Structure formats: C-alpha cells, structure tokens
Amino acid sequence: MEAKKIAILGAGPIGIEAALYASRLNYNFKVFEKGKVADHVRHWGHVKLFTPVDLNTSPLGMQILERENLLEGFPQPGEFQTGLDYVNSYLEPLSRSPGLQGKISPEARVIRVGREKLLKEDYPGADERSKQPFRLLVQQGNQEFLENADIVLDCCGVYSQHRWIGAGGIPAVGERGWQSQISYWLDDILGSRAAHFADKTTLLVGAGYSAATSLLSLLELSKKHPATWVIWAVRGIQSQPIRRFPSDPFKERDRLAARVNHLAARCDGNMEFFNHVSVESLESLGPDKGFKVVAMVQGKKVQWDVDRVLGLVGYSPDNDMYKELQIEEDPFTLGTGGMGPALAKVSKGALPFGLEMKLEMLKQPEPGYFVLGAKSFGRDSNFFIKNGFNQVREVFNSLSGEGAVRKAIPQERK
C-alpha cells in the first residue's frame, strides 16, 4: 500500500521536527515554507531564548546531527542560545540533512487548503471527507500551482500575523493605513535597527516579554544616545505590567519581568510609564516624520507626538488558510481542536513546558488536518518548542502506530 502523502506547512522548529519524523517513517512528504527555513526565528534572532538548548532540541534531531558529525561546538544542556544561534547550529543543518534534501520548498506560501470536490459544509465531521485529498493552492514567486495531500500538518506559527494596538484589540483609527510605518515585531534595537531608534521618542505599546525586551534595549540605547526616549503604554490597570509566575523555572524570564516591573514603578531613566491606556487614533506625519497619537489614559484624553511606534501586543493565527475546512477553534484563545480547553485548565499559571499531548487535543472535525506548534495555541503565548515536539510525536503515533514510532524514533531520556 502506498504511503500517505503529507504536506507540512512551515519550516520552523515544529515543521522541521515533523519532516524528520515523516522521513524516518518513510512517508511521501513535502514542506512548504513561505520564506526561508526558520524565517520567524530569524526575525528575532538577536534575542536569547528563555529556555535552555535541551528544551529546544529533540532526541531525533540530535541523533541526526551526531550522525552527520555536526555536534562540534554545540552548546551543552542547560546553556542558552540566541534565536540566530539556534537556527545556525540546529534548524538549518537539519534542513540540509539527507532525509530532508529536496523536500523543503522555500518561498512557497500556501494560500488556501480545501478538499477536492468538497465544500466546508459537506459531510460535517464525517470520515467521508477523508476519501477526497486535500487541495493546496501554493504561490511561489509570481507563479501559483496546486498540490494534493492526504495529511496536512499546519505548523505555520503566528509571528507573521500581528494584532492591533487600538482599544478592544481592533485597529486604532488610522492604524491600518499606517501599519507599514509601525513595527509589530522584535526589532534589533541595539544592532541593525539602532540608527532607526537612536535619539528618537518611541511609543511602546504592550505588556508582554517582547515589550519588556524592547524597553530594556531602548533604555540601553539611550546611554549612548541621550535623546532617546520611551513612552511605555499598557492596556491593563496593574502597576506591575509583566506577569510573574511563582517559582518560575525559567530564571531569565523572571529576572526580565522583575526588572521592567521595577522600572515601571520608578520610571527610572529615559522613560515614562502609563497604564490603563486605550489608543484611539494615530496619524503619520509623513515618512520618517513621526506620528500624532491620541489615547485615553485612565479616562483622560492625551496626545503624544512620537517618532516611532512599537506595537508589541501579540500575534494571532492566520485562519484564512483553512476557512474552507471543518476546523474547530476555541472562542477565547483561537486555539485549535482540544488545545483551547487544555490551555484553559492551566491559564491561571505558567503553562508546563512538558505539557502532555493527547490525540484528542489535536484532532479536528476535518480528518487528517492537524494544527501543531504555536498556531495550535492561538493567541495564548505560553507556547514552548517542547510542547510542539510532543504534538508531533503524538500525531505520528496516530498515523503509524505507537510501536512503529517507538522503534524508529529515539525517545526522551527520563
């Protein structure tokens, strides 16, 4: 019997892991990546991960690197890497390993996925749908083409789909028109983007770790460029904007939160901090001429004239891709399948990096379509790469049988 054809969407950490499994288990598979391998990780490559290297690598990945003699100088367990180091030492070499050669299509964006001869409303939740292959519309350069697959592993992540800085999570007035002049991602403020922010006033919107990282970088930049100034605005009413977890196992994350919460309380350095902020509108004054921003701060209208806007308010999954499929989403987080209820159970604390994955958490009404990685968590940012690795193993347990996977794929050491 011919092995089922698998389409893997995305060549980030989870997509690469899925491809390694598919290769080892002798599936016919292809990886579609809309940019370069690990494109999202490269965008924040200057940032050091909170998690040590052993939580961002898998036994299978390490086994392959060892066989290819690529472990010389590799970090030891417990050490930390920047995103770019992680790409260069782990993800990129794996993408070039023998089992993946010729299997990854870069600059190939999957626009839509549907079912051959079926519409979304046909055979609701029935196995009858699996009798028709998936139909993928792919764009590569200026060309569009179609691909078919029996199984789709959607590992696209969320980093390319920013959320909005306006009140209630919708765009502020004018934001959509000026979004090309706003940065919604982790800029390399102390490196390649230093000149862009030096001696400028930046409005920083957000209350997560990306915002905290950018705040510290801007304040560090101000030591060499004293005219650099930061207006830090958060939506919540809490005076300590960054969430801390009791007995946080990731000490660097906790140190970051503690440090920026202290800065928010004291407003030390070249910064101002405002909570209970609702951004109402913004207007660009022209390319590189800054913005006029109107906001409500604790119920009072204020106007800020700033040079730069950093909107680090989180990311959201691109669900347009599977609109014509029967995909279940949690109404609160947009987590897919059973991930939403699972996330709700741990929403009051830090999500365990070793969260056990069950097939029931990953299955969809659409047979054969699995959303894995950060995208499966929707808007919940508590995703760890190790969670995605666990998801991949569970999916292939269901496709090949747990015994076959255990025989072919090395397991975590207890």
Image: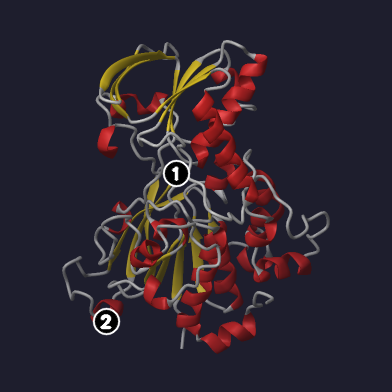
Question: Badge 1: how crowded within 10 Å, few (<14), some, or many (20+)?
Answer: few
Q: Secondary structure at mark 2?
A: helix
On the rendered structure, is 141 left or right of 263? Answer: left
Depth check, mark 1 against mark 2: the one in front is 2
Viewer-side residue, 227 vs 321: 227
Q: Secondary structure at mark 1?
A: loop
- The residue identified by callout 2 is 127
Q: Quadrant of residue 269?
A: top right
Residue type marked 1:
Gly
The circle on residue 63 is none
**Which residue is rendered at x = 39% and y = 40% of the image?**
162
**Which residue is rendered at x = 77% and y = 69% of the image?**
67
On the rendered structure, is 407 left or right of 286? Answer: right
Whole-percent x, y for residue 15 in the image: 52, 61
Q: Is residue 394 above or below residue 201?
A: below
* Residue 182 visible in the snapshot: yes
- The residue identified by callout 1 is 141
